Amino acid sequence: MTEFRCRALVAVALVVSVVVVRAGWAGAPTDLLRVQIDRVVKTLDEPDLKKEGKTRERRVAVRRIAEDIFDFTETAKRSLGRHWQPRTPAERKEFVELFANLLERSYLSKIELYSGERIAYLGDTIEGDQATVRTRIMTKHGTEIPVDYKMYKQGDRWLVYDVIIEGVSLIANYRTQFNKIIQTSSYQELVRKMKTKQAEFSDDKHRTSASPIDRG
């Protein structure tokens, strides 16, 4: 699977996941996913947000929803792996913010690629406060793409912390990149690279040329 196709698929998957839990909804993970998917579609189909020049507003709207239900801290922690424990509270806070921005640039910015793909719900597996929701993205070309959502229960809510597309984990993908940079250089170098990417993408003209964190 090419990097661009992977990012496009993750973008579509995140579109689905950003409505899994919101406003204290409680219930089976699959039920939450199915009931709330319409909210994402309505957001993407909002006439005003579909207008030319509304790209930034669309991304802000999706980011706000994502922040409500996607546990960026948990995802960042698992992506950093064993290198999370030595970090100070200040370093962890900084890393989570950089990581959330990285996800936005790399995946949520591809939100425009969503074009009405259908989602088939295959059920979920719940073990204590952990759950995996199994779905299939039905493309317009007739192919089926397996997408699993890893979730955990916090209070009365289920939160998404990982998305697995065609067997490839979002967390595992980043953990490999992050670990490579830290082992060959340092944690400080990883942060420097993430900050550099953030600065590059602060200018809209660079937003369409996203690249992996370990390039540059």
Image: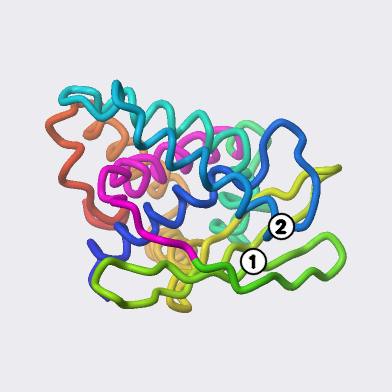
Tell whether 136 sits left or right of 55. right
Kindly report the secondary structure that dominates the magenta region of the rendered protein: helix
- Residue drawn at the location 70% of the way across and 56% of the way down: 31
- The residue carrying mark 1 is 133
- 191 lies above or below 141: above
Tell whether 135 sits left or right of 15. right
**Residue with the most extreme left position:** 205
Residue 36 place in picture, x, y as percent:
60, 44
Q: Residue 187: tell me if it is visible.
A: yes
For the residues labelled 2 and 1, say whether their Cβ atoms are less than 8 Å apart: yes
- Residue drawn at the location 28% of the way across and 56% of the way down: 212
Residue nearest the observer in this picture, 122 or 9: 122
- For label 1, the SS is strand
- The residue carrying mark 2 is 29
Residue 104 place in picture, x, y as percent:
39, 40
Tell whether 3 sits left or right of 27. left
In this rendering, the count of numbered labels is: 2
Residue 201 place in picture, x, y as percent:
24, 34
